[in-house]
Amino acid sequence: MSANSSLRNRFERGLSAPICLTWELTYACNLACTHCLSSSGRRDPNELSTHEAKSLIDEIASMQIFYINVGGGEPMIRRDFFELIEHAVAQKVGVKFSTNGTRIDRAAARRLAGIDYLDVQISIDGADAATSDRLRGAGSYDAARRAMDHLKNANFGPFKISVVMTRESIEQLDDFEGLASMYGAQLRLTRLRPSGRAVEQWDKLHPTLRQNRDLYQWLLARPTVLTGDSFFHLSALGESLEGLNLCGAGRVVCLIDPVGDVYACPFVIHEEFRAGNVRVAGFSDVWTKSELFRSLRGPGNPGACGSCGSYDACRGGCMAAKFFTGLEPTDPDPECVFGHGETALAAKRVVLRPTSSPDHSRRIPVSLSAR
Amino acid sequence: MLAEPSTTFDPAAAWRVNTQVSLRDEAFGAMAYHHGTRRLVFLKSPELVELVRSLERYESAHQAIDAVVASSQHDRYKTALSSLATSEIICER
């Protein structure tokens, strides 16, 4: 992907439809990751029905949205999972879905391998069971590896291994690269956001300044590693990383949650960033008419970052990371590579951290082996 | 530059939009998505979009350029088509 700065300005004013639409199919999940950004666990009784979901896919196709990022919860828990993704790809809406892999057995892997326009991302959060399971729960790493084995045996092709960069996992970059290479898979690294249950994990899990600098160099040397454009705040260190390098919230990306609520991006499932619901007048209506989205597409206020020579590179960073750490939209990113975010946080007398408003966390701990 | 210019782009040949590609109009031009390579490419002018869409109506890329693009811009648009050929957004037919 390439975009010059005039094109980036154009993107910041919004597009006719999102480039990247994330759709969380369900809040139900058989894991209980400590850093889940959608606070998933229990299914919401109000989730879109199969019929509603198919109508939404039809609308997505008519808006010429090229592909959807499907997540959850664990999307494969929905009984109509295959019916929905097959409905999407039949209309040339590509599907990239994220899964913990627990539902990918030999039969599921074969079925997935037979579907065109489909990408699978298996999530792990460590290059070994001990590291990954600390965040994702006992047995989750082995389950993910079994899913990878099944995909490989089914000749699925290059699936993706998706890792959130935490203070621990970021020390294992070369191991992840080795694992991906062993499977002929693509490595995908994304930024830890302090969203959902990660609000409470942020302080101990987010990478240090030094780790972020090392990650930036590592990524610069490996432009084929996928990042979902999530490290643009690091581009202030010099040369831009691959991607659009902007906050796309409400401009080129958005999120539809399992009950049809539309949020500005996958990392701000909070009432303050809710733009509307697809059940009212359809998704297109929300995308084009939402007051929230219109304001996000207006001229941004660089705030304190305006006087920093690197604003053009990092655009002040991630809106969600600021919001959930208690910073203002005009403050620097909490992980500003020059430490301005930490200074801004330290200067606040009272830091109010919002919690994610819909919380579907389970009330009792779950164990994968007990299922 | 959208991509490195191809050395294999033959403007005398007949071209068309790759069947694996979806084009979506935007105010700046269009976005093209290749479902096979999963690459997103930006066509940064409405004229380029018109040219790309017209390719299949002409016996060569040259003819399409002659018909759609002002003569002072021919080289620029030939380079753009060459980039699109490299990224497999357009292909020979």
Image (cartoon, coloured by chain):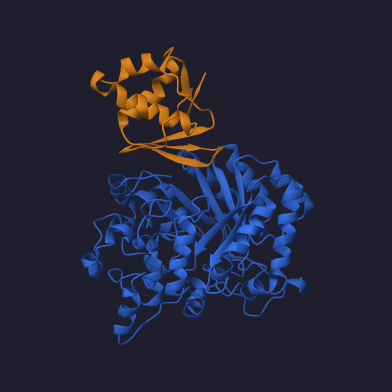
Q: Residue at x 41, y 27 (%)?
A: B82
Q: Nearer the viewer, residue A256 or B47?
A: B47
Chain coloured orange: B
Viewer-proximal residue among B24 and A218: A218
Residue, far left = A307
Q: Is residue A78 left or right of residue A277?
A: right
Q: Position of residue A33 (x, y in %)?
A: 60, 72
Front residue of B93/B72: it is B72
Q: Colour of chain A?
A: blue
Q: Nearer the viewer, residue A170 or B60?
A: A170
Residue A244's x, y, as percent?
Answer: 39, 51
Q: How many marks?
A: 0
User: Quadrant of residue B12 in the image?
Assistant: top left
* A86 over B81 or under it: above or below: below
Side (left or right) of A154 relative to A307? right
| Residue lying at 50% horizontally and 33% vertically, measured from the top left | B21
Query: Which residue is the extreme one toward the bottom?
Result: A349
Q: Position of residue A189 (x, y in %)?
A: 53, 60
